Amino acid sequence: QVQFVESGGGLVQPGGSLRLSCAASGTIYGIYTMGWYRQAPGNQRDMVATITTTGSTTNYADSVKCRFTISRDNAKNTVYLQMNSLKPEDTAVYYCNAALRLGIFANRWGQGTQVTVSS
C-alpha cells in the first residue's frame, strides 16, 4: 500500500509564490520518474513538470518554464514544485505522480492540492 501526502497549495495573489510537496510512504522498493500535473475545471489533466530518478533531467510545460522548478529528495521520497510569478491561469488542482517499484512496477497519483491564483 502506497500513500502520497501532498501539501503547500492555497490561495495566492498574482505574482506570488507557492511550494508544493508530495511525500510517498509505504512499502516502496524504488521510485523512478516523478512529476506534477494539473487539472483546471473543464480541462484535461496536463503535465507541469517531471524529474528523473537522480534529478539529472527535468522537463517542463512551456507555460511554466522559467517560473516553476521541480526537485526531489530521494532520502525522503519527496518531490517538490517551487512556483514563482504565479498567474491566474495557473489555478488548478495539482497532482503528484510517481513511477514506483512495489511488488510490481506501478504508477500512482496523489490526492491533489488546490492552487488558486487570484487578487
Image (cartoon, rainbow, N blue to C red):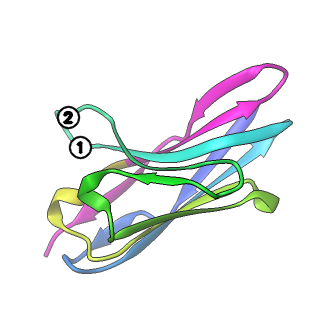
Amino acid found under the numbered disc labelled 2: Asn
Look at the image and give the residue range highlighted in magenta: 94-119
Looking at the rendering, which quadrant does residue 9 occupy? bottom left
Q: Residue at x 62, y 42 (%)?
A: 33
Q: Quadrant of the C terminus?
A: bottom left
The answer to which of 107 and 116 lies nearer the viewer is 107
Amino acid found under the numbered disc labelled 1: Ala
Q: Residue at x 69, y 48 (%)?
A: 53
The answer to which of 49 and 78 lies nearer the viewer is 49
Q: Quadrant of the N terminus?
A: top right
Q: Is residue 41 visible?
A: yes
Do the residues bearing badges 2 and 1 touch, measured as CB atoms within 8 Å?
yes
Badge 2 marks a residue whose secondary structure is: loop
- Is residue 96 found inside the magenta-colored segment of the image? yes
Q: Main secondary structure of the magenta part?
A: strand
Looking at the rendering, which quadrant does residue 100 occupy? top right
Q: Position of residue 14 (x, y in %)?
A: 19, 76
Distance of mark 2 from mark 1, alpha carbons? Answer: 5 Å
Image position of 110 with respect to 54: above or below: above
- Residue at which label 2 appears: 43
Q: Position of residue 42 (x, y in %)?
A: 16, 33
- Residue at which label 1 appears: 40
Q: Position of residue 107 (x, y in %)?
A: 61, 28
